[in-house]
Amino acid sequence: MRRYARLYKAFLKYTLMEQMSFRGNFLIHVLVELLWFGLLLLFYDIVFAHTRVIAGWSHAEYLVLLGTFYVVTGLVEAFVMPNCAELSELVRTGKLDFALTKPVDEQFILTVRKIDWPTLSNVAYGLAAVAFGLRALGWVPDVRDVLLYLTLIASGFVFFYSVMITLAVTAVHLVRNQSVYEQWFYVIMFARYPPDIFSGEWGSILRKCLTYLFPVLVVVSVPAKLLARAALDVRGAAIALFAAVVGFAASRWIFRRTLRSYRGASA
Amino acid sequence: MMGKYGTILRTSISERLIYRTDFFVSTALRFAPIITTILLWRAVFAGAGRAELASYTYHDIVAYYLFSTLGRAFSSMPGLATGITRDVRQGQIQRFLLQPVDYLTYLLMYRVAHKLVYYMVAFVPFVILFSLCRSVLPGWPEPERLIAGLLSLLLAFLLGFHIEASLGLLSFWFLEITGFLYIMMGVNYFFSGHMIPLDLLPSLVRQIADVLPFRYLAYFPAAVFLGKVSGAEMWRGLLTQTLWVGVWVVCSRALLARGLRRYAAYGG
């Protein structure tokens, strides 16, 4: 375990040094993320100029939701996505062999090695939006809620990690060509909205699927509700935790199985 | 003359059809965001408790997003600018200096092929989507509006192509333009009306959007089909759109000519 911690520290240091050596690029990347976040805020500013609530969510509550979405997806985009994008490249070039011969867990070295530092700024923007939202609501969460919030964020992160790693590693097997970032966009698309907009005949069917079968609606909205409304959705939290644990176990199983069928290209 | 570029068109079409399944799946998936957009706006109208927001009814908004998606299907140029950057940086562009093929015309033909295949595949989801949303659409447009709408889609394609090509050609001067491209993508997304109908913007922002070329990439074709502009105003809009196409054609041609003069090729 100590060895893994030391390795991870080296990954953090090395990737940061690498990316900071192109300082101008780093800064532009951070600004681009800010621009897109600003556009999203502007969109809701315009929409909320016309209405006071959207499916029961006020503007301040919505900021907490949007911020939470940015925190969770920002973490995944910084820590998971660059590794997913690299995986198929490693297979194509035969460099996967080198990773497999290292005396560490394959899934560890293949899925946490790369970190996209500038994208991590999204987490900061998200937290700022959460803070603004809470201030507008005039509400300070207590320690218990903050801890619970962080736990739910972590389980959301693990859920998305499992989904994306599974998609990336099976892409290797199925020789799919679609970019992993495009798939990511479709995975998270629904989580950006409050689950309450999925109503009506078709909407509620969609909502059930996205709550129980593939719980993207849960992993962001449950922690957001906890902070914005001081209300813990116990069933939602249970689903989120369950999805994280089962998702992780499943992704590990699939990862191992898929790698076993990898035949190597260089040796 | 036509034969040469006709061959490029045919070859590009068969190239696009190599990854068929992938292409079908990703095209179908591209329609998914429209579902959340519709659900969101339904909740907005329910929350506002009003039938109209800035002259848009709920039906108008849904129809607007359908038509602006159609506009984007013509005007968006994924990979064009980054492709040019790659050609310039890796020296592929030399090929076009040696062969009697004009670089921009080649790219245009390649893009036409790309779009034709895309429409063949996207035709089915578009028809399903439009027929599902039949009740919110304004009805079949009269001939004049139909012609104007189709013309504005065609012009949106040409405008989108030449704007994106001009951005890509900047790589003759700058080593790294992806950051810049991402910023332009955001500007385009907002000012083209892809994000929100421009009529809903605060008036100052609206005035800025009206003098920029981006509104002709998605907002204007949608406004024509929706009947938000008519008569002389509609044709004036088409004229302005044509002028913008002219401006960007000249711009991209000038950038290519000047860029090639700067460009130094080694080896080969």
Image (spheres, coloured by chain):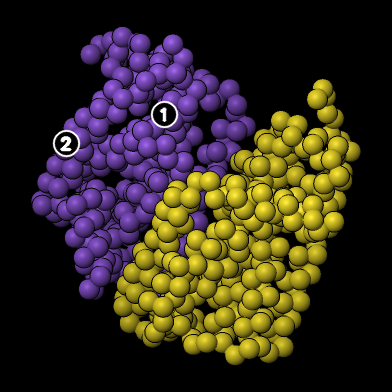
Chain colours: A purple, B yellow
Q: Residue A266 appears at what percent x and percent y?
A: 46, 14
Residue B268 drawn above or below residue B40: above
Report helix, strand or loop for mark 1.
helix
Q: For this rendering, which residue is in front, A157 or A265?
A: A265
Examine the rendering and report whether any part of residue B66 can be seen. Answer: yes
Q: Which residue is mark 1?
A: A87
Image quadrant assignment for residue A121: top left
The tag earlier along the polypeptide, 2 or 1, is 1
Q: Chain of mark 1?
A: A
Examine the rendering and report whether any part of residue B191 can be seen. Answer: no
Q: Residue B194 appears at what percent x and percent y?
A: 53, 64
Q: Residue at x 31, y 25 (%)?
A: A261
Q: Quadrant of the N terminus of chain A?
A: top left
Q: For this rendering, which residue is in front, B199 or A125?
A: B199
* Residue A143 left/right relative to B255: left
Residue A147 drawn above or below residue A110: below
Q: Chain of mark 2?
A: A
- The circle on residue B250 is none
Residue furthest to the right in view is B261
Q: CA distance from mark 2 to mark 1?
A: 23 Å
Q: Which residue is mark 2?
A: A245
Q: For this rendering, which residue is in front, B110 or A195?
A: B110
Mark 2: few/some/many CA within 10 Å (<14, 14-19, 20+): some
Residue A25 drawn above or below residue A40: above
Q: Residue at x 64, y 56 (%)?
A: B113
